[in-house]
Amino acid sequence: VWSLDGQEVARSERWQFRAPATAGSHQVRVEIQDRKGIKKQQIWQVLVKAVAPPPEPPVWSMVEPRTETLTVQAGEVLTLTATAELARQELARQEPAAKSAIRYVWTLNNEPAQASQPERFRFSESTPNTYHVAVVAIAPTSLTSSAPRWTISVRPRDIVVPAPTVSG
């Protein structure tokens, strides 16, 4: 007779131990009896440890603007914002500094771009063209998020023609 923590689990020559969902010490006991009625028992103390789930990359909690294709005039300033959090909220609660430990890497046309504020990128180009901006969030575990991307078309500045004046 096999028992786990005092509860009978099998009546056979063999039994396979499957770790219970709860971590901690568990007792496995087997009792055997021969044809003469002589009983023997063996008891094992089994320690089940909780295993931390595998780390996950950060997830985006806010990305602005939400539109992925934008058009601005040459020289116009556009601010892009992205905020990420650790994937597991329970981990974030255990480590209050975890959110501040997330690093942001912004790229402009696949080249690293400097940002004075990690969660914001100030885009301003004077040359009409199409530009590609992306950002990734990097967790303290070095896992990287997916990258929000923007395609920004910079068009020439509007030319303001003064209204004709009539002199008389």
Image (cartoon, rainbow, N blue to C red):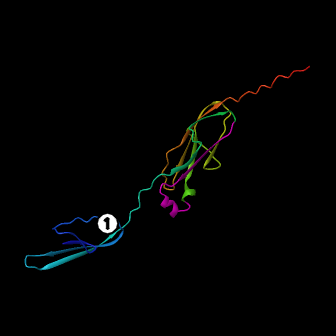
Residue occupying the point 7% across, 79% down: 36
Compared with 33, 104 (above or below) is above
**Displayed quadrant of residue 152:** top right
Compared with 96, 29 (above or below) is below
Type of the residue with mark 1: Pro
Q: Is residue 154 left or right of residue 57?
A: right
Q: Is residue 3 left or right of residue 83?
A: left
Q: Is residue 44 magenta?
A: no
Which residue occupies the extreme right position in the image?
A: 168
Q: Is residue 52 left or right of residue 89?
A: left
Give the extent of the magenta segment.
76-97
Residue 3 is situated, as x and y percent measured from the top left of the image, at: 23, 72
Residue 7 is situated, as x and y percent measured from the top left of the image, at: 25, 72
Disc 1 marks which residue? 20
Residue occupying the point 56% across, 61% down: 97
Residue 76 is situated, as x and y percent measured from the top left of the image, at: 69, 36
Could you classify mark 1 by the number of other residues whose Cα lies within 10 Å: few (under 14), some (14-19), or many (20 or more)? few
Quarter holding the C terminus is top right
**Displayed quadrant of residue 68:** top right
Q: Is residue 50 left or right of residue 37?
A: right
Which residue occupies the extreme top position in the image?
A: 168
Residue 82 is situated, as x and y percent measured from the top left of the image, at: 58, 47
Q: How many marks?
A: 1
Which residue occupies the extreme left position in the image?
A: 36
Using the image as rendered, state which of residue 154 and residue 68 is in the foreground. 68
**SS at badge 1:** loop
Residue occupying the point 54% across, 40% down: 149
Q: Is residue 82 magenta?
A: yes
Quarter holding the N terminus is bottom left
